Amino acid sequence: MRLLPLLLVIAACGTEVSKEAPVSALPVKASANATLPVAVDTVPKPIQDTLTAAPAAMPARIASPTDDGCAEYINATANGVELVCYTRPERMAAREADLPGMLESAWQLAWQGAPRSIADDFERGISTEHVHMPDTLDVEVKHYRDCNAREPHAVMLYRVWTNTAGQVGWRSR
């Protein structure tokens, strides 16, 4: 009785039932010991061609500037800040425009990493966070010629502070 609706559906679709066995497409897992089929070139090459063939040409090395890949960084603590920059001596004048932003970043990083303590006033129900940081922070900016330089060609010393409005001020030492 159940075959009748199935036969009617097959007949209504107009498809012929295949007499071949169905093909399953299960994924094949390769184990460490199994060998996988490899495509083999069916046209044999003469032995002379493989022995005298020139090796593949190596790609030409692209010349890169000596300061490629240098990473400038700021080492900031509440005791002082060291900025490391890679600037050639002839580009020092152009780098002066970046100085206020670098010094402000130095202050912010030192402030974020400064030790903190919390003072509780239980009688009034107030907790106050104190940031232990000096009023004026010493900043040392070291300019290296390139990544391979062992000594900086210029060292500049600055003092950085914030005013009551939270603006960062600075001057050279």
Image (cartoon, rainbow, N blue to C red):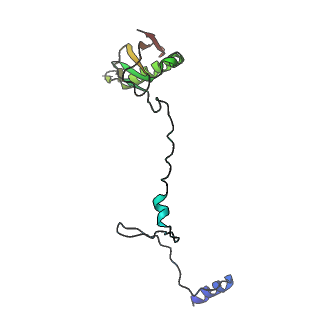
Q: Residue 59 or 30: which is nearer the viewer?
A: 59
Q: Quadrant of residue 145?
A: top left
On the image, the x and y values in percent for residue 93 come to 52, 15
Q: Against 22, is 96 above or below?
A: above
Left or right: where does residue 132 sit relative to residue 14? left
On the image, the x and y values in percent for residue 39 come to 49, 69
| Quadrant of image for the C terminus | top left
Q: Residue at x 37, y 14 (%)?
A: 138
Is residue 111 in view?
A: no
Q: Quadrant of residue 170?
A: top left
Left or right: where does residue 80 sit relative to residue 15? left
Q: Residue furthest bottom?
A: 1
Q: Residue 138 or 127: which is nearer the viewer?
A: 138
Left or right: where does residue 118 sit relative to residue 39? left
Is residue 19 in view?
A: yes
Q: Residue at x 34, y 69 (%)?
A: 33
On the image, the x and y values in percent for residue 121 come to 32, 21
Q: Residue 18 or 119: which is nearer the viewer?
A: 18
Q: Against 119, is 56 above or below?
A: below
